[in-house]
Amino acid sequence: MQKEAVKRELGCVLLLLSAGLTTLAEGRFQKPAAPPASQTKTESFWDKVLRYAGISHDASNLKAPGDEVVSGQIWLADLSSRSTKQMTTSRGYRSPVFVPGGKEILALKGTDVVRVELSGGNAVKRYTVAEITKLVGFSLDDPDTVLVLTGKPAELPTVGLLSLNSGKVTAMPYNPSLGRDLEMIEHLQSWERVYGSTSLYTKRQSKETLYGPVEWTDVYLKSGGDAALDVSQCDGANCGQPSLSADGRYVVFIKSRD
């Protein structure tokens, strides 16, 4: 009887051990549970716009003196030599920006997108874009793409991406009912430009002459804690619409005597 009892206990132990090993094996080869699907964050209009050169993360500075400069001649300021030179002989240009690589300037003349080499020479037409009003800045990720504004003067502008390869403009939608989006739109329409710790802006100047007071606007550059520098030195002519080269050496701007 005692032997039978021992056999029964040994059988129970072996049965439990076998069941445990089976469970362990099943758990070893069982596929892990799939993690919960993560929600994809929708990229905001601000996030998209901030990937283009010259756009402020703050966007607090909106309209400023010099925004009234409509068109004129393209001028270049060399920050290393503190000198300026005229780039075009004819008038009617506006909204110049540096093409990535630093050897060319892209600008508008009417509804034409034109290219001007830093070495000088006449502007060469690239494309015609209906109702284009401004070249804002090139993509920090794609040197083929430039942020532009289009539309009628009395309406909210359309924000678009101009491809230099195709000449086509792809709309970048925003929500006109959101105050934050409208704040960025007004910033894009202004001429303040921010590149890291360096900013470009216009400032009203005045002086007394024999014929009375004279007022004009100059382009200023402020870098870090340094004093602001008058880079356009226009002395009587209205200057504005500035843009900084990628290497930080040049500033391009529009000079108007109209």
Image (cartoon, rainbow, N blue to C red):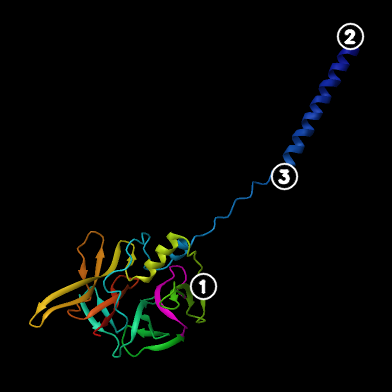
- Report which residue position mark 1 lands on: 171
Give the residues in magenta: 128-144
Q: Disc 2 and disc 3: Cα gap in Å?
A: 46 Å
Q: Tags 1 and 3 in contact by the CB under 8 Å rule?
A: no
Q: Given this view, does label 2 or label 3 mark the residue nearer the observer? A: 3
Few, some or many residues within 10 Å of mark 2 (<14, 14–19, 20+): few
Residue depicted at x 59% and y 52%: 39
Q: Is residue 151 magenta?
A: no
Q: Decide if residue 170 is on the left or right side of residue 70.
A: right
Residue 208: quarter of image: bottom left
Q: Disc 1 and disc 3: Cα gap in Å?
A: 45 Å
> Which three-letter amino acid code belongs to the residue tagged 1?
Ala
Res 2 label: 2
Q: Earlier in the sequence, mark 1 or mark 2?
A: 2
Disc 3 on helix, strand or loop? loop
> Which three-letter amino acid code belongs to the residue tagged 2?
Gln
Outermost residue, top direction?
Answer: 1
Q: Decide if residue 149 is on the left or right side of residue 223.
A: right
Q: Decide if residue 100 is on the left or right side of residue 17.
A: left
In this view of the protein, which residue sits in the foreground, 21 or 78?
78
Res 31 label: 3
User: Where's residue 173, x and y in %?
Assistant: 51, 68
Quadrant in which the C terminus appears? bottom left
User: Where's residue 3, x and y in %?
Assistant: 89, 11
> Which three-letter amino acid code belongs to the residue tagged 3?
Lys
Residue depicted at x 30% and y 74%: 67
